[in-house]
Amino acid sequence: MKHKIYPILLHFTLLGLSLSALLSCTNRKEEVVVVATQHPNPYNITVPQFFPTQMNIPADNPLTVEGIKLGRYLFYDGRLSGRTESDSLMSCSTCHLQSNSFECGVNNFDNGHPFGLSGIPTQHSMLPLINLVWNNSGYTWNGAVYNGNPTTNNRTLEDIVLIVIQLPSEINGSAQKTVETIASIPIYPPMFEAAFGSPEVNIDRICKAIAQFIRTLISSNSKFDKYMRGEVQLSTQELNGLVLFTTEQGADCFHCHGGGGNVLFTTNLFYNNAKDSVFNDVGDRFHVTFNTQDIGAYRAPTLRNIAYTAPYMHDGRFKTLDEVVNFYSEGLVASPYTSTFMHKIPNGGAHLSPQQKSDLIAFLHSLSDEDFINNASFSKPADLP
Ligand code: HEC
Ligand code: HEC
């Protein structure tokens, strides 16, 4: 996604206002009624064992059962595009498929390189929508959307929804068209009432509901998780792969992708992982921080469910995990911007044996969570057209 400066979002006007401030604010009468009468049911995330407790949930958008349900419907409803003709429908689920850990997969679009309703390709390959409630350092490949962003209003998952609706390479629509279309569909006003206390459909509520749904997309039941909880044993090959992954003498992956103590399998931080010596992507981390250390740097994505999310890297240059592992084994390209965590740079890679490569890949497969990609609460509601 390209990140542009958008006008102050409507919902920030409510941010930080206390209930008493709302009550004294005459042009917010409707919202006052909302606060006084609505009773959506709070939804508490049960933090899986070993997962961090610090979550990224804005104070003005607590999770509720009704909000999450509404968000799920909107996430899957092609009319979110503000259009109703069958050839111009697009929703989040057009690209973010549950079967691919909410990426589009290498067999869809142009070999996993999606494009929007305008036909314009997205700037980067996809990112999965999993465990984002634990990302406190910045969304998207370059982290341009982060809490406390002083220069733009791109801060939260809520903001991403609005960006996506407008972005030519994604939904290519407008907030107004989306609101009008969603409001005209009979199932929605009662769902907005249940979630937010009045049937009013507005863009703030649409963004909030979808963001709530995304925060519930939690993957924590891979074979590796079951092993950590003492429920199953990993195979010898998977265990060998785990050791390679988490040791500097081995493949040395853990500094950036976690593992061991960091069960998110990402630090959510940004690194140049030595793929290139020439850099010309205006969507890299450098174009967010303007710190030369960030040239050619991107967020290290989670390696959970990595077997479902080819193609790999921000530009989707690798189609298989074999290609990725061959790259880290013997394909590293040094540059002045290479992360200091790429310890194998002097040798051009970790030089793994064929056996070690297949061990490492077997371990990466143990991070696949079939329950997640089949979880009925994350799937398309049966009564949506
Ligand atoms: C045309 C395909 C497409 C559609 C439609 C789409 N996305 Fe995405 N999404 C992407 C791509 C590509 C990225 C990676 C963008 C980047 O970082 O450059 C992405 C990234 C994201 C991220 C950031 C994830 C992270 O780890 O930081 C979120 C959140 C997201 N999308 C939510 C949504 C929502 C919500 C919708 C629907 C309103 C949506 N997307 C619709 C393609 C799409
Ligand atoms: C210096 C930090 C660092 C180290 C060490 C590192 N990676 Fe990465 N990894 C990254 C970054 C950053 C990306 C994304 C780069 C990009 O998109 O251009 C990435 C991307 C990947 C991807 C593709 C993810 C996706 O969703 O597209 C895989 C798979 C991967 N790394 C596996 C590994 C393995 C296996 C090792 C150990 C052999 C390893 N990484 C070592 C930082 C690192």
Image: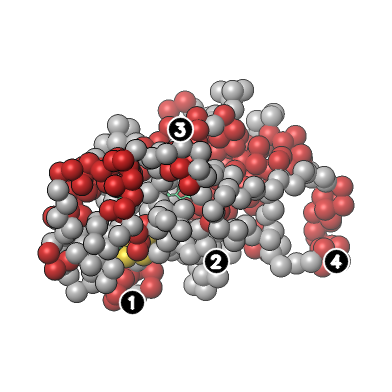
Residue at 72% over, 36% down: 191
Evaluate if marks 3 and 2 touch, with contact meaning CB atoms under 8 Å apart.
no
Q: Quadrant of residue 309?
A: top left
Which label belongs to residue 370? Answer: 3
Q: Quadrant of residue 328?
A: bottom left
Image spot of residue 378 (x, y percent): 55, 35
Residue at 59% over, 37% down: 72
Given residues 199 and 84, the one toward you in this image is 199
Of the two numbered discs 3 and 4 on the same chain, state the one appearing first in sequence. Answer: 4
Given residues 213 and 218, the one toward you in this image is 218
Circle 4 sits on which residue?
A: 20
Of the two numbered discs 1 and 4 on the same chain, state the one appearing first in sequence. Answer: 4
Looking at numbered disc 2 in the image, what kind of residue is underneath it? Asn
Spatial CA distance of label 1 from label 4 is 43 Å
**Residue 230 located left or right of residue 11:** left
Looking at numbered disc 4 in the image, what kind of residue is underneath it? Ser
Looking at numbered disc 3 in the image, what kind of residue is underneath it? Glu
Given residues 354 and 52, the one toward you in this image is 354
Residue at 73% over, 42% down: 195
Which label belongs to residue 291? Answer: 1
Which one is closest to the eye, mark 3 or mark 4? 3
Of the two numbered discs 4 and 2 on the same chain, state the one appearing first in sequence. Answer: 4
Residue at 32% over, 32% down: 108
